[in-house]
Amino acid sequence: MPASLATVFAVLADPRRYDEFVVGTKRIRRFDPRWPEVGSVFHHTLGTGPLVLRDLTRVVEVTAPHRLVLRAQMRPFAVNRVAFSLNREGEGTVIEVEEYAIEGPAAALWGPALDRLMWLRNQEMLRRLDKVAQRRQARQAQVAS
């Protein structure tokens, strides 16, 4: 991503932005002002149309600005472990995301087909995250000038 490491992490550290880049997230209903401290949460609504789930995401591990590990709940279907790893590359950022089910029926069914679907979903998520981070960086540059 062309955005700086600090900018990308700032987006991940702002729970209000998750519905802009996480595929399937309709709305962030409320959040812990301590986010992204370990144990802090945000409450989200997932789904499409009238089919929605209301649950939460919790911070499991954070090493700012390089790593953020989340426990994303979509009960009763799944609880996923989502790990964002960020590294500086020149003026930009290389970001890797690893996501898989750790609880619920999805964990029992996880295999190559679900792995491929998650990979495709996360490619779109990273594309959206890049757009959000670039907008944030452009606003910061505008304020600084």
Image (spheres, helix red, strand yellow):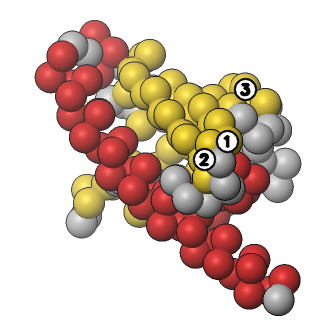
Does residue 45 appear in this view? no
Disc nearer the start of the sequence (3/2): 3
Q: Position of residue 145 (x, y in %)?
A: 82, 89
State the separation of the CA atoms marked 2 and 1: 5 Å
Q: Amino acid at mark 2?
A: Thr
User: How crowded is the residue under tag 1: few (<14 C-alpha within 10 Å), some, or many (20+)?
Assistant: some
Secondary structure state at the residue bearing disc 1 = strand
In the rendered structure, which amino acid carries the disc numbered 3?
Glu
Q: Nearer the viewer, mark 3 or mark 2?
A: 2
- Asked if labels 1 and 2 touch by Cβ distance under 8 angstroms, the answer is yes
Disc on res. 9? none
Q: Which residue is mark 2?
A: 93
Total numbered badges shown on the rendered structure: 3
Q: Is residue 5 left or right of residue 129?
A: right
Looking at this view, is 107 or 92 the one in front?
92
x and y percentages locating residue 64 in the rendered image: 79, 38
Quarter of the rendering containing residue 29: bottom right
Q: How far across and how far down the image is residue 142, in percent?
A: 74, 87
User: Mark 1 against mark 3, which lies toward the viewer?
Assistant: 1
Is residue 142 at least partly visible in the picture?
Answer: yes
C-beta proximity under 8 Å, tags 3 and 2: no
In the image, which disc is placed on residue 88?
A: 1
N-term-proximal mark, 2 vs 1: 1
- Give the answer, above or below, for where 112 lies relative to 53: above
Relative to 16, say whether 104 is above or below. above
Residue on which disc 3 sits: 61
